Image (tube, grey):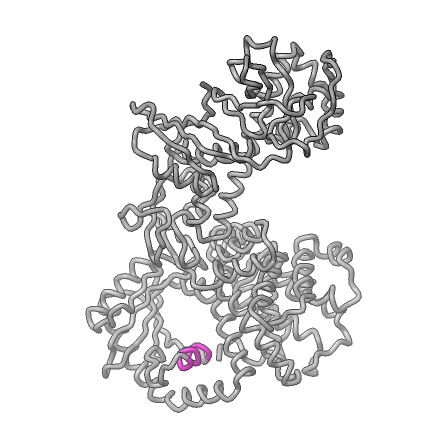
Amino acid sequence: MSSLSKNLDDIKIEDVLEKVRSYVEDEEQIQVIQKAYDFAYEKHKGQYRKSGEAFIYHPLNVAMILTTIYADYETISAGLLHDVLEDCDCTPEEMEEVFGPSITKLVKGVTKLSNINFSTENEYLIDYYKKIIVGMSEDVRVIIIKLADRLHNMRTLWALPEDRQKIKAHESLEIFAPIAHHLGIHKIKSELDDLSLRYLKPDVFYDIAEKLNKTKIERDRIVYDMQNEITDLLNEHHIPHEIKGRSKSIYSIYNKLDKGKKFSDIYDLLALRILVNTEQECYLTLGLIHSKFRPLPKRFKDYVAMPKPNMYQSLHTTVFGIEGYLFEIQIRTYEMDEVAENGIAAHWSYKENKGSGSAANLTSTTEQKLQFFKSIIDLSHDKMTNEEFVNSVKDEVLNNNIYCFTPKGDVIELPRGATPLDFAYKIHTKVGETMVGAIVNNNIVPLDYELQDNDIVKINTNKSSTPSKEWINMAKCSATKNKIKAFFTKNEREIYIERGKYSLEKELRKRKLVFSEFLTDENIEKICEDIHVENLEEIYLAIGNGKATVNGVINVIHKEEDVTPKVVKVNPKSIDADIIVNGIDKVKVNLANCCNPVYGDEIIGYITKGNGITVHRITCHNLENMDERIVDVTWNSNTNKRYLTCLLLHMNDNENHVLDIVQSVSMMNISVDGIKVIDKGDHATYELDCYVSSLEQLDKLILMIEKHRYVEKVERAMK
């Protein structure tokens, strides 16, 4: 069991302040802690815990636990006050008046967490509550206080009935210990694990404890002799150091036994930790030990050069020590040891102004190092159902993570199965969007390559490059998929807006209307009301995506006089044709081959000599000299035909992309009639004939093709 778990029932505020003074020099901050204790003492007066002690001993113990990880004065003050809002006659306003907004905010955060009824009935609920914890904890210090609160509650768990003991122990093992691990607070994580096992499986716990005690004398002798050997070796080479025998937690031993190992096979029961002053001395010490004691293959880990995301740094090696016993040895600096034991909380005690423990420093460190929390917070911003969220957290954040590196050595944490796309988007959305390739361990790999632990990944980018929709299927992380989808949603919107604006300007010029005079605030308001949108941008969007017609929008303000004679109204349902000619029931209608109209296009009819009516797109250049025989035509809304259209694909290279394009088009359930190269210079041009059901489907097809990095532009052919 950890040294943290000693009996602290007789603790006094003076003990807490003495420990704080060992790393906090500002006496005013010390006085705030004293004031917090006095305030909590008065508010909790007359209250007792189930263990029988006065309630104030609980916040005192929480504060003492926080001092062991060098918490700042605000965190310790909030630790003393953490139950006041929930259990006493005190309002947040009263607390803020006495202690200010920062400490009060921490207490309110802990109070919110205390109001969650945790449950560990199934994995979904476990992960969902982890989400709640992170979502409610804007300041990581709230979680640290809650961990200290839970640890002291676990130390006094004997006071609860057995069924409640098991519930609390299960919560601690499944929810709080993993969070302590991700924060790097080893001493709290280890004790929570051991205490949880003690109440969940007492027979197993005490059996392991008994076996450890039986072998303790022999283990202590071997460790002592090994320690002397290494001390002599390091003294001989003038390396100042300190060596500690390292005890293995009962829970970690249980995990190994549970996986089928025998007690006698758990060789890292013999463990040493060597502390030195500098990083260079870490490597010198490692070299000296390996020169004298043969290392066990594949058991060396360098977390100094490549730290874990929770800031853990250490050299790990396993060697054949004296009498042939295997020893697990950790080598680290004193600072690394503090961070390894106390996690993020230790970081501020090694700042230049040691002891200040400023929230700004902590926040900065949190943003840089806690990828675990950042990952969950990022996921919570994405639009997904609770079940999708939980699956994403379970698959991508909490389980089976791998750690890859940028060429500069920065650690990127990813779910197993992640691809270079996920790596790129994890660095920055812009890096992902402009990605053109990846190099892993000096080898070029495809974008759907499955990354492995410790891969070094370089992302190649091009400012003019954009994502492809195919990437959605290549990505593993939900956050990556959602960022790619968001890009296309935004891009499609921008293209539709631009297209709508262009169409409106063109029609206004055609009608000889002044653009600025037409789009007055009053007119915009009328149009918005008529077509049920909010602003001018949405008017353009409605025109661009076909939800409103240009003429319909203009006619809200300037209705054209109908100079044609009145004709009989035709019921579209009674017509088999896909084109309706106003006032005429049956007439031969052809779609013009020059512009290939599709359903949704603005169209006009032209009366031919002896061949019925030919329908053109309203923008067709062949209509310029045909005013005399023009008739109004409309699409029959009941049509379900497919229409031939011709696209010109302008490339930015001359490579053969025919197969890739045909596959992409086919994925959209669009039939390809033919594709040919019509210009094969430095920049090839393809002519693509295909059948689409509507202008909306055609627009989506154009957008999809334009996302290929080798496509410069796509336009509809006009012959």
Q: Position of residue 639 (x, y in %)?
A: 60, 35
Toward the right, the furthest residue is 89
Q: Quadrant of residue 176?
A: bottom right
Residue 99 in view, yes or no? yes
State the residue in front, 356 or 282: 282
Q: Main secondary structure of the magenta part?
A: helix
Toward the left, the furthest residue is 291
Residue in the picture at 52% in, 84% down: 201
Residue 491 in view, yes or no? no
Q: Give left or right: position of 30 versus 691.
A: right
State the residue in front, 23 or 349: 349
Q: Height in image: 76 above or below 205?
A: above
Tally of marks: 0
Q: Position of residue 556 (x, y in %)?
A: 74, 22
Q: Give left or right: position of 524 versus 363.
A: right
Residue in the picture at 34% in, 35% down: 658
Q: Quadrant of residue 537?
A: top right
State the residue in front, 518 or 240: 518
Q: Give left or right: position of 226 versus 539.
A: left
Q: Is residue 56 magenta?
A: no
State the residue in front, 115 or 452: 452
Residue in the picture at 73% in, 78% down: 48
Q: Which residues are magenta?
A: 251-258
Q: Height in image: 398 above or below 575?
A: below
Q: Quadrant of the C terminus?
A: top left
Q: Position of residue 103 (x, y in %)?
A: 66, 57
Q: Position of residue 486 (x, y in %)?
A: 53, 42
